[in-house]
Image (tube, rainbow, N blue to C red):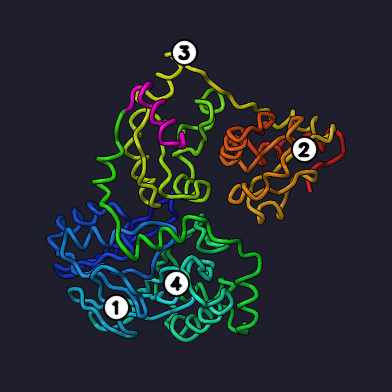
Amino acid sequence: MIIEQIYTGCLAQGAYYIESNGEAAIIDPLREVQDYIDKAANGNAKINYIFETHFHADFVSGHVTLAEKTGAKIVYGPTAKTTFDAHIAKHNEVFKIGDITLTVLHTPGHTMESSCYLLKEENGKDYALFSGDTLFIGDVGRPDLAQKSDVTEKDLAGFLFDSLRNKVMPLADEVIVYPAHGAGSSCGKNLSKETVGTIGNQKETNYALRANMTKEEFIKELTDGLLPPPAYFPLNVKLNKEGYRSIEEVIKNSAKPLPIKDFERISNEANAVILDVRHQSEFVKGFIPQSIFIGIDGGFAPWVGALIKDITQPILLVTPKGREEDTITRLSRVGFDNVLGYLEGSFTAWKKAGKEVDTLNSIAADVLQEQIKCKMPIFDVRKPGEYKSEHVKVAENTPLDFLNNYSAEFPKKGNFYVHCAGGYRSVIAASILKARGFHNVIDVTGGYDAIKITTIERTTAACSSTVK
């Protein structure tokens, strides 16, 4: 028996390859599926099943393409409805893969069709639970309102309480837990960095699995402070229910090098977003006016999904040389398939051609301390939980995820400062604000990590603190 977790860091997502005695199954595959096909070929195995734990909202799954290429059967849990051919399983239905089996456990709560898959060894002993978004390491799935329904957030939380107590927690402590996500995913609130655990460990450490917890307590803890889902979630659900173009077709249509003249023409004609994915340290020194920054080496795809509201939005890319196809692939993972091409020669070519260049003002953390004394406006774009944990006293929290909601709070006149934890998110925020006419925005290099160190040093020297 082979079980391989295939973890994609930028999505905080785990897909699974399972193989036994010449047969294979894939759970929650990514949109690019060739790796799964190659793994099966290397093991002389045939992929017979593609198991989906639910209709994913945070990424486009590879189920449709993989089924077309291998003939494998797509399996969803009870109540799922698709426009493509799929087997809608019953609770406790058993699927045989070589010498092992997977049993469907219908666990509504994250979504109504959400299901876990319990792997049993050849001797029938429970071995591992592929828990999808029902159970994470350190957390459970958020009640997902990305799907249109009359069911409320609290209804879903109540269903999840019952699913966990009646179908997951009775499993033996040694059963391994393989979740669909880890830290960084928007599908939960407090996910661990660990991506594998056990039922017993989760009973001891996961707040949502406390033995003496009432349903009312569970619902309250699960829904308190729950932020709205990102705008792209319902659009990804739709693609996962109805199908999509193959990633090969998307790359073929999008990986087009564009000379500067064509790049400018298409930008104007298509009203395209110019998305610059270089490192933030390069972006702040020079970029195409009106372009926005979301770096390829950060939490790229989820931030694109959160900040560019429409997956059909035309996009033009400015990438590091050699990262063009990688960027297009990562965008397609969250359904952004309308890339019209990339700037040939990257930003270097633009600069050499003498085209107009914009820059982003930035300051070091120690300089910010002087601005605090002058009562200059400071905005912290970290998540609310990060802000509540520790923050600069005078800073306002304007989370990057919902930057649009705070537009009226940023001053039109006079400088103001933005920071995050390490400098990635604040450059995203500053680039968006500058594209909208806030030329008085200044980024704090190094973010709160740098601010905190500077503040501690100054606290030692001046015996006063600006950090709460």
- Disc 1 crowd rating (10 Å Cα; few below 14, some 14-19, many 20+) is some
Between disc 2 and disc 3, the foreground one is 3
Q: Which residues are magenta?
A: 258-275
Q: Secondary structure at mark 2?
A: loop
Between disc 1 and disc 3, the foreground one is 3
Residue lying furthest left: 44
Which numbered disc flags the more N-terminal residue, 4 or 2?
4
Q: What amino acid type should be assigned to the residue bearing mark 2? A: Pro
> Is label 1 in contact with label 3 (beta carbons under 8 Å)?
no
Residue holding disc 3? 354
Nearer to me, 52 or 4: 52
Residue holding disc 1? 88
Q: What amino acid type should be assigned to the residue bearing mark 3? A: Gly
Q: Main secondary structure of the magenta part?
A: helix
Q: What amino acid type should be assigned to the residue bearing mark 4? A: Thr
Q: Position of residue 349 (x, y in %)?
A: 40, 18
